[in-house]
Image (tube, rainbow, N blue to C red):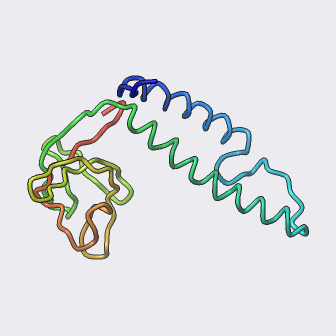
């Protein structure tokens, strides 16, 4: 078997995404609300806690696959606005929990990294770059179905 193309890999990821959605629905979401267990049984309690950990990770994987299936809707340099939030030229601004891709530059290498935007008490930052790295002037792109 040869290497998968990006399109073939995307199809396989969509299949995985559908299976993860089915499992999450069966278990009652990543909190496992439909998982019956005996809390007085240490083995049941342990297995449940492990399943919840797996479900949480599956939920994250499902959200990432969904994100990657959306088209890039905007790309540009972000600047800090008058409210202290970082925004794209269109006016779309980022708040804590916003996800995007930021262009990382290491020496001669440039590549996109998936990140979320958070606030450290003083300013917003990209989790992939670290709390002490300014995002002002960085190239960012977003993917949304209805942007």
* Residue at (15, 58) in percent of width and height: 106
Give the image location of residue 105, x and y in percent.
14, 55
Kindly identify the residue that appears in the image at 80 percent across and 50 percent down: 35
Q: Quadrant of the C terminus?
A: top left
134 left or right of 63? left
Query: Which residue extends farthest front?
Result: 1
Quick check: 25 left or right of 101?
A: right
Give the residue at x 90% y 67%: 41
Residue 54 x/y as whole percent: 64, 54
- In the rendered image of this protein, does residue 26 appear above or below residue 36? above
Whether residue 81 is visible, yes or no, is: no
Tell me if I can see residue 43 in this picture.
Answer: yes
Residue positioned 36% across, 60% down in the render:
96
Q: Nearer the viewer, residue 10 or 121?
A: 10
* Quarter holding residue 37: bottom right
- Comparing 32 with 104, the one in front is 104
Where is residue 111? Give x, y as percent: 20, 47
Residue 97, image quadrant: bottom left
66 w.r.t. 134: above or below: above
């Amino acid at each position: 078997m040869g290497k998968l193309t990006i399109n073939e890999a995307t199809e396989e990821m969509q299949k995985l995404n559908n299976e993860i959605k089915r499992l999450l629905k069966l278990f009652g979401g990543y909190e496992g609300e439909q998982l019956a267990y005996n809390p007085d049984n240490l083995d049941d309690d342990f297995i449940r806690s492990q399943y919840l950990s797996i479900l949480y990770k599956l939920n994250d994987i499902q959200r990432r696959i969904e994100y990657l299936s959306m088209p890039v809707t905007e790309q540009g340099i972000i600047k800090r606005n008058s409210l202290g939030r970082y925004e794209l030229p269109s006016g779309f601004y980022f708040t804590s929990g916003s996800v995007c891709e930021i262009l990382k530059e290491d020496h001669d290498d440039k590549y996109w990294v998936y990140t979320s935007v958070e606030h450290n008490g003083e300013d917003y930052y990209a989790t992939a770059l670290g709390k002490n790295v300014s995002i002002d002037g960085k190239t960012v792109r977003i993917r949304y179905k209805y942007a």
